[in-house]
Image (tube, helix red, strand yellow):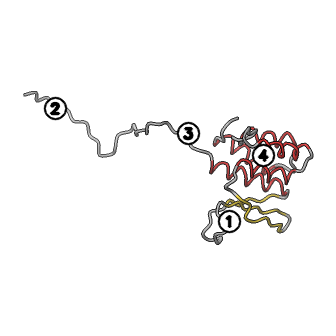
Amino acid sequence: MSVLSEHTSTDLGERLRDAYAVTAEFMADIISQTCRRFPSAGQSCKTSRVERLIQSCAWTDAAIALLDLELPQWQVRRLVYDEGEWHCALSRERELPDWLDQSIETHHTDLALAILSAFVEAQKIAAPESRGSVPTVRREPRSLYEPLFVDNIS
């Protein structure tokens, strides 16, 4: 299972925006590209629940169950249907006022796709950056850097 990379998330984000409905294959792609805990040995009950919901084509419930399994610290803050689109907001601090909270907001004509879009965006934020244990140093010289040659060996 791959951790969400920038290239993958862009392609997946575009596919989510362009999709009309969720399919089992599309859900499998989302899971394989974004999920680090699926299937989870420690949470087999939640994993089997997601699988059952996918098999029964309960896409909205499957999206919420996947959010619960993969990003338990994120919660649905708001689901609103307005002018033919579903607006979904996910938040880590649901009890904070809107103006203090850093929430993720997405929209789509399909409810499950709106939730999955927000899930993918939250997964991008939550994905750990791959860093080595040793900090990197910039290789380019500074603008004030001037090499100096000294030929005095006394």
Amino acid type of the residue tagged 3 in the rendering: Ser
Q: CA distance from mark 2 to mark 4?
A: 61 Å
Q: Nearer the viewer, mark 4 or mark 3?
A: 3
**Disc 2: which residue:** 150
Of 44 and 8, which appears nearest the observer? 44
SS of the residue under disc 4: helix
> Closest to the observer: 67 or 22?
67
Q: Amino acid at mark 1?
A: Arg
Q: Which residue is mark 3?
A: 130
Q: In this image, 153 relative to 106: left or right?
A: left
Q: Quadrant of residue 64?
A: bottom right
Q: Residue at x 72, y 41 (%)?
A: 42
Residue that sits furthest to the right in the current view: 56
| Residue 106, placed above or below residue 19 | below
Label 2 near label 1: C-beta < 8 Å? Answer: no
Crowd tier of the residue under label 1, counting other residues whose Cα lies within 10 Å: few below 14, some 14–19, many 20 or above: some
User: Distance between the Cα atoms at labels 3 and 1?
Assistant: 29 Å
* Residue 43 position in % (x across, y down): 75, 43
The numbered dot on residue 15 is 4
Image marks 3 and 1: residues in contact by CB distance under 8 Å: no
Label 2 SS: loop
Q: Residue at x 59, y 44 (%)?
A: 128
Q: Is residue 128 left or right of residue 24?
A: left
Report crowding for label 4: few under 14, some 14 to 19, many 20 or more residues within 10 A (C-alpha): few
Q: Is residue 37 left or right of residue 83?
A: left
Dot 3 or dot 2: first in sequence order is 3
Mark 2 or 4, closer to the camera: 4
